[in-house]
Image: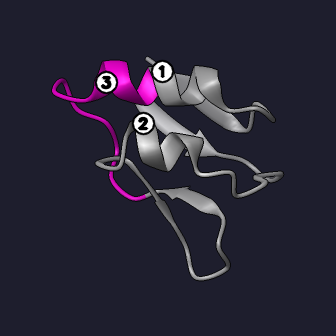
Amino acid sequence: MKAKVIEGCISCGICVNICPEVFKFNDEGVSQVYKQPDSSNEDKARSAAESCPVSVIETEG
């Protein structure tokens, strides 16, 4: 699985709270993929993407 945060993040922090192993805030204060998901956190990364209120987290695989 691959994850990507596209333009439009509102810095709500939901993804960072759900899956901090994958998502972190960058220097501008918006979420970014810190490390691609692996088998141990794939479900949490998908949940984070589904929980994004502005739907800016894309997943594939």
Q: Amino acid at mark 2?
A: Ile
- Give neighbour class at mark 2: few <14, some 14-19, many 20+ (Cα, 10 Å): some
At 31% from the left and 24% from the top, the residue drawn is 42
Q: Earlier in the sequence, mark 2 or mark 3?
A: 2
At 64% from the left and 73% from the top, the residue drawn is 29
Instruction: Compare residues 48 and 7 and report the one nearer the observer.
Output: 48
Q: Earlier in the sequence, mark 1 or mark 2?
A: 2
Above-or-below relation of 9 to 61: below
- Dominant secondary structure, magenta: loop
On-image quarter of the N terminus: top left
Badge 1 vs badge 2, beta-carbon distance below 8 Å: yes
Q: Earlier in the sequence, mark 3 or mark 1?
A: 3
Instruction: Compare residues 32 and 60 and report the one nearer the observer.
Output: 32
At 57% from the left and 28% from the top, the residue drawn is 49
User: In the image, is 11 to the left or to the right of 1?
Assistant: right
- Give neighbour class at mark 1: few <14, some 14-19, many 20+ (Cα, 10 Å): some
User: In the image, is 25 to the left or to the right of 2?
Assistant: right
Callout 1 secondary element: helix
Q: Amino acid at mark 1?
A: Ser
Give the magenta part as a residue range: 34-46
Above-or-below relation of 21 to 39: below
On-image quarter of the C terminus: top left
What residue does disc 2 label? 18
Instruction: Compare residues 59 and 17 and report the one nearer the observer.
Output: 17
- Residue 32, given in percent of the width and then of the height, sits at 54, 58
Q: Is residue 37 magenta?
A: yes
Is residue 48 visible in the rendered structure shown here? yes
- Which callout, 3 or 1, points to the residue nearer the camera? 1
Residue 47 circle label: 1
Residue 42 circle label: 3
